Image (cartoon, grey):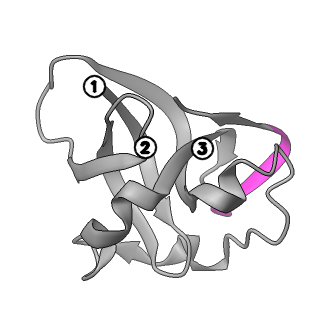
Amino acid sequence: MKRYASHFLFLPGHGCLKQYVVEMDEGQGASRVFPLTEEVENTEWLPGVIVLLPFEEAHLGQETVGLSFDKCHNILTAVPPGIEEELPYLVPWLFSPFDFTTMQPGAGTQRKLLQ
Protein backbone atom coordinates (compact mmCIF):
# COMPACT_ATOMS: atom_id res chain seq x y z
CA MET A 1 0.00 0.00 0.00
CA LYS A 2 1.22 3.47 -0.89
CA ARG A 3 -0.02 6.84 0.27
CA TYR A 4 0.59 10.21 -1.33
CA ALA A 5 -0.39 13.60 0.07
CA SER A 6 -0.21 17.00 -1.56
CA HIS A 7 -1.28 20.62 -1.26
CA PHE A 8 -4.38 19.83 -3.33
CA LEU A 9 -6.15 16.78 -4.71
CA PHE A 10 -7.92 17.71 -7.96
CA LEU A 11 -10.99 15.74 -9.01
CA PRO A 12 -11.72 16.83 -12.61
CA GLY A 13 -15.33 17.85 -13.01
CA HIS A 14 -15.70 18.52 -9.27
CA GLY A 15 -12.93 20.67 -7.81
CA CYS A 16 -10.03 20.49 -5.35
CA LEU A 17 -9.69 19.09 -1.89
CA LYS A 18 -7.06 20.82 0.25
CA GLN A 19 -4.35 18.64 1.83
CA TYR A 20 -5.73 15.18 1.11
CA VAL A 21 -4.13 11.74 1.01
CA VAL A 22 -4.57 9.25 -1.83
CA GLU A 23 -4.12 5.63 -0.79
CA MET A 24 -3.29 3.03 -3.44
CA ASP A 25 -3.08 -0.74 -3.42
CA GLU A 26 -0.29 -2.42 -5.43
CA GLY A 27 -1.13 -2.54 -9.14
CA GLN A 28 -4.55 -0.99 -8.58
CA GLY A 29 -6.13 2.42 -8.79
CA ALA A 30 -6.83 4.56 -5.76
CA SER A 31 -8.45 2.71 -2.88
CA ARG A 32 -9.42 5.68 -0.71
CA VAL A 33 -8.91 9.38 -0.14
CA PHE A 34 -8.96 11.14 3.21
CA PRO A 35 -7.93 14.48 4.73
CA LEU A 36 -4.38 14.88 6.00
CA THR A 37 -5.11 15.98 9.56
CA GLU A 38 -2.07 14.39 11.19
CA GLU A 39 1.10 12.58 10.22
CA VAL A 40 0.14 9.25 8.64
CA GLU A 41 2.54 6.31 8.46
CA ASN A 42 3.97 5.50 5.00
CA THR A 43 2.68 8.72 3.44
CA GLU A 44 4.87 10.57 0.96
CA TRP A 45 4.34 14.35 0.81
CA LEU A 46 4.52 15.65 -2.76
CA PRO A 47 4.56 19.38 -3.52
CA GLY A 48 2.06 20.39 -6.20
CA VAL A 49 -1.32 18.96 -7.15
CA ILE A 50 -2.37 15.32 -7.39
CA VAL A 51 -4.95 14.74 -10.11
CA LEU A 52 -7.12 11.61 -10.19
CA LEU A 53 -7.72 10.52 -13.79
CA PRO A 54 -9.59 7.52 -15.19
CA PHE A 55 -7.28 4.58 -15.82
CA GLU A 56 -7.83 4.75 -19.62
CA GLU A 57 -6.83 8.44 -19.82
CA ALA A 58 -3.98 8.16 -17.35
CA HIS A 59 -2.15 5.54 -19.37
CA LEU A 60 -2.31 7.42 -22.68
CA GLY A 61 0.96 9.07 -21.79
CA GLN A 62 2.16 12.36 -20.43
CA GLU A 63 -0.03 14.44 -22.72
CA THR A 64 -3.24 14.48 -20.62
CA VAL A 65 -4.97 16.04 -23.63
CA GLY A 66 -8.17 17.87 -22.83
CA LEU A 67 -7.54 18.05 -19.09
CA SER A 68 -9.11 21.28 -17.88
CA PHE A 69 -8.19 22.85 -14.56
CA ASP A 70 -11.15 25.27 -14.72
CA LYS A 71 -12.85 23.65 -11.71
CA CYS A 72 -9.61 23.73 -9.71
CA HIS A 73 -10.78 27.08 -8.26
CA ASN A 74 -13.71 25.23 -6.70
CA ILE A 75 -12.31 24.29 -3.26
CA LEU A 76 -14.36 21.42 -1.86
CA THR A 77 -14.91 20.79 1.85
CA ALA A 78 -15.72 17.08 1.44
CA VAL A 79 -15.33 14.25 -1.06
CA PRO A 80 -18.18 14.52 -3.62
CA PRO A 81 -20.82 11.77 -3.54
CA GLY A 82 -20.03 8.86 -5.84
CA ILE A 83 -16.26 9.36 -5.90
CA GLU A 84 -15.62 6.41 -3.58
CA GLU A 85 -17.19 4.05 -6.12
CA GLU A 86 -14.99 5.47 -8.90
CA LEU A 87 -11.69 5.27 -6.97
CA PRO A 88 -10.61 1.79 -8.15
CA TYR A 89 -10.75 3.14 -11.73
CA LEU A 90 -8.79 6.33 -11.00
CA VAL A 91 -5.02 6.73 -10.90
CA PRO A 92 -3.09 9.67 -9.46
CA TRP A 93 -0.84 11.99 -11.45
CA LEU A 94 1.36 14.61 -9.81
CA PHE A 95 1.54 18.05 -11.44
CA SER A 96 4.51 19.94 -10.03
CA PRO A 97 5.41 22.72 -9.72
CA PHE A 98 1.91 24.19 -9.75
CA ASP A 99 0.85 27.86 -9.76
CA PHE A 100 -1.38 28.17 -6.68
CA THR A 101 -2.22 31.80 -7.49
CA THR A 102 -3.97 30.92 -10.75
CA MET A 103 -4.68 27.29 -9.76
CA GLN A 104 -3.28 26.22 -13.14
CA PRO A 105 -0.15 24.35 -14.23
CA GLY A 106 2.59 26.84 -14.97
CA ALA A 107 5.43 26.93 -17.43
CA GLY A 108 7.70 24.03 -16.62
CA THR A 109 5.08 21.96 -14.81
CA GLN A 110 6.01 18.30 -14.97
CA ARG A 111 3.53 15.41 -14.92
CA LYS A 112 4.36 12.17 -13.16
CA LEU A 113 2.23 9.05 -12.89
CA LEU A 114 2.20 7.88 -9.27
CA GLN A 115 2.42 4.14 -8.86
Q: Is residue 100 above or below residue 38?
A: below
Q: Position of residue 53 (x, y in %)?
A: 58, 59
| Foreground of the two, 111 or 49 | 111
Q: Is residue 112 above or below residue 20?
A: above
Quadrant (top left, top right, bottom left, bottom right) of the N terminus:
top left
Q: Position of residue 67 (x, y in %)?
A: 74, 68
Q: Position of residue 85 (x, y in %)?
A: 28, 71
Residue 32 falls left or right of residue 110: left
Q: Is residue 102 above or below residue 25?
A: below
- The residues tagged by marks 2 and 1 sit, at their Cα atoms, a distance apart of 21 Å
- The residues tagged by marks 3 and 1 sit, at their Cα atoms, a distance apart of 17 Å
Query: Quick one: label 2 or label 3, which is nearer the N terminus?
Result: 2
Closest to the camera, between mark 3 and mark 1, is 1
Residue 22 quadrant: top left
Residue wearing tag 1: 1
Residue 51 falls left or right of residue 37: right
For the point 22% across and 71% down, the residue is: 78
Secondary structure category for the residue under label 3 = strand
User: Magenta region's main secondary structure?
Assistant: strand
Q: Which mark is residue 7?
A: 2
Residue stretch in magenta: 101-109
Count residues near mark 1 (Cα–Cα under 10 Å), then give few for <14, some for 14-19, many for 20+. Answer: few
Determine if the magenta segment contains residue 60: no
| Foreground of the two, 106 or 42 | 42
Residue 4 quadrant: top left
Residue 113 falls left or right of residue 33: right
Residue wearing tag 3: 93
Q: Residue furthest top?
A: 42
Q: Which mark is residue 66?
A: none
Q: Residue furthest left?
A: 38
Determine if the magenta segment contains residue 106: yes
Secondary structure category for the residue under label 1 = loop
